[in-house]
Amino acid sequence: MIVCICNALREKDCREAAGSPAVRRAGCVYRQLNCRVRCGACVATMKAIVDELRDERQARAAAEALAEREPAAVE
Ligand code: FES
């Protein structure tokens, strides 16, 4: 799926760029992919991708912390 028509950004590439822990906002994804927002129609989708991946990273980190603290709780 194409996320950004103006920059021809595929969802796969956006998710890959947004997967970096350094990416905290949608604007970071455009910078990582060496482009910038033009019409802005894709910003909400980009933000949703960044938020989703950030939430997944946080959930994974919380699960890992819990597993370290209480190994029996996650088995
Ligand atoms: S669709 Fe992404 S800037 Fe226009």
Image (cartoon, rainbow, N blue to C red):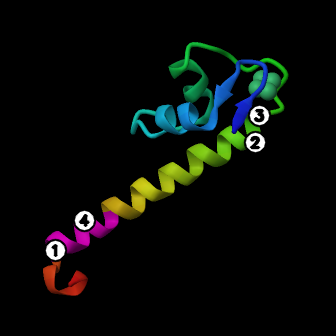
- Foreground mark, 2 or 1? 2
Residues tagged 3 and 4 counted as in contact (Cβ below 8 A): no
Image side of residue 6 versus residue 68, left or right: right
Residue 64's label in the rendered image is 4
Residues tagged 3 and 2 counted as in contact (Cβ below 8 A): yes
Kindly identify the amino acid type of the residue bearing the numbered disc 2: Ala
Distance (Cα) linking label 3 and label 2: 6 Å
Q: Which residues are magenta?
A: 62-69
Residue 49: give x, y in percent of width and height.
Answer: 61, 46
Residue holding disc 2: 44
Residue holding disc 1: 69
Q: Secondary structure at mark 3?
A: loop
Residue extending farthest top: 34
Distance (Cα) linking label 4 and label 2: 30 Å
Sequence order check: which comes first, mark 3 or mark 1? 3
Kindly identify the amino acid type of the residue bearing the numbered disc 4: Glu
Q: What residue lies at 71% left-to-right and 33% top-to-bottom?
A: 2
Q: What residue lies at 50% left-to-right and 50% top-to-bottom?
A: 53
Distance (Cα) linking label 1 and label 4: 9 Å
Q: Main secondary structure of the magenta part?
A: helix
Distance (Cα) linking label 3 and label 4: 33 Å
| Disc 3 C-beta below 8 A from ligand 1 | yes
Within the magenta stretch, is there residue 65? yes
Image side of residue 3 versus residue 12, left or right: right
Q: Mark 2 Cα within 10 Å, few/some/many (few <14, many 20+)?
A: few
Within the magenta stretch, is there residue 46? no
Sequence order check: which comes first, mark 1 or mark 4? 4
In which quadrant of the rendered view does residue 9 lie? top right
Residues tagged 3 and 1 counted as in contact (Cβ below 8 A): no
Sequence order check: which comes first, mark 2 or mark 1? 2
Residue holding disc 3: 42
- Foreground mark, 3 or 4? 3
